[in-house]
Amino acid sequence: MADDLIRMEGVSKSYGRVQALRAVDFSVRRKEIVGLLGDNGAGKSTLIKILSGAVPASGGDIYMNGKKVNITNTTDAIDLGIETIYQDSALVTELSIARNLFLGREPVTGARFLNRLDQQLMNRVARELLEEVGITKNIPATTPIGSLSGGERQAVAIARAMHFDSELIILDEPTNNLGVAETQGVLRFVRNARDSGHSCIFIAHNIHHVFQVVDRIVVLRRGEVVADDIDPKETSVEGVERIITGILDEEIAAGLSTSQPS
């Protein structure tokens, strides 16, 4: 469609005899937050790893802004404006919060050929970003990542994506291991990302978090899309859970239900 930022057509992925994805069609519109849901092994992580360049697809095509693109590695995805925050986002534990936020994209000060890092700028931006994702306690930007809790590390990974201007931000379990304040900071970030013109793919086992921020829900089951246009305003958490688990299909097959629950 004309307003699609990302469109994946017939995307498949196999690992030997295991078919992780089966001819999946998936799209994200501009300024849209899509919740990607499914049980363990549904294919969610495989789909976003293909989109982020972490693993190659076995088949299918990807389009961005209506043009076919070839995403063979993570650099390709980043160059296209796709930033991904995985549940286990890789951070360098020996480096500071500020250095991790700018890893590979550090600003320099003075003559460019001297390659002198602008530590003052990195520290200032780091403090501002940590506040935005809900870390209110005073953690110096020079603190090594290895000294942080799991939730604080996740917040740093999210803050890193916030700073760089990406068209699509993929968040894989971004609220996992976060406290209440940090979780609310993440959800607030997702809403603000849409308001500022970004699109997001939001994956979370906590469906209540998904319902708070997404515009549309897509459900995968056993590597296939079983629902792709669920409006969270017109359904319930319980209704979506029945689609995820396949209970709704069983009820329909048994003649016990003829419509999607609301």
Image: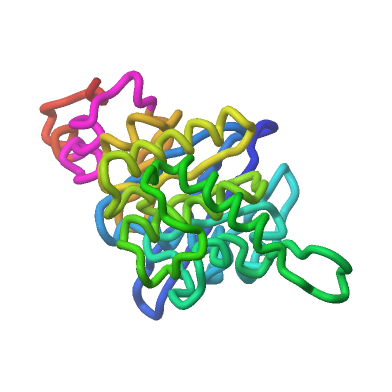
Where's residue 243, x and y in %?
Answer: 24, 38
Q: Residue at x 64, y 51 (%)?
A: 164
Q: 169 and 251: which one is in front?
A: 169
Asked if residue 232 is among those painted magenta in the image, a careful observer would answer yes
Of all residues, the one furthest to the bottom in this rendering is: 16
Residue at (44, 64) in percent of width and height: 89
Determine whether 162 is above or below 78 in the image: above
Residue lying at 16% horizontally and 26% vertically, measured from the top left: 257
Q: Is residue 8 above or below residue 198?
A: below
**What's the magenta region?**
231-249
Q: Answer yes or no: is residue 53 visible.
A: yes
Taking 70 as reference, is 223 left or right? Answer: left
Image coordinates for residue 16, horizontal then vertical, percent = 40, 80
Q: Is residue 45 above or below residue 54?
A: above
> Percent x, y for residue 182?
34, 44
Q: Quadrant of the N terminus?
A: top right
Q: Quadrant of residue 100?
A: bottom right
* Residue 242 lies in the magenta-colored region: yes
Residue occupying the point 41% across, 76% down: 15
- Placement of the C terminus among the 4 image quadrants: top left
Between residue 106 and residue 90, name the one nearer to us. Answer: 106
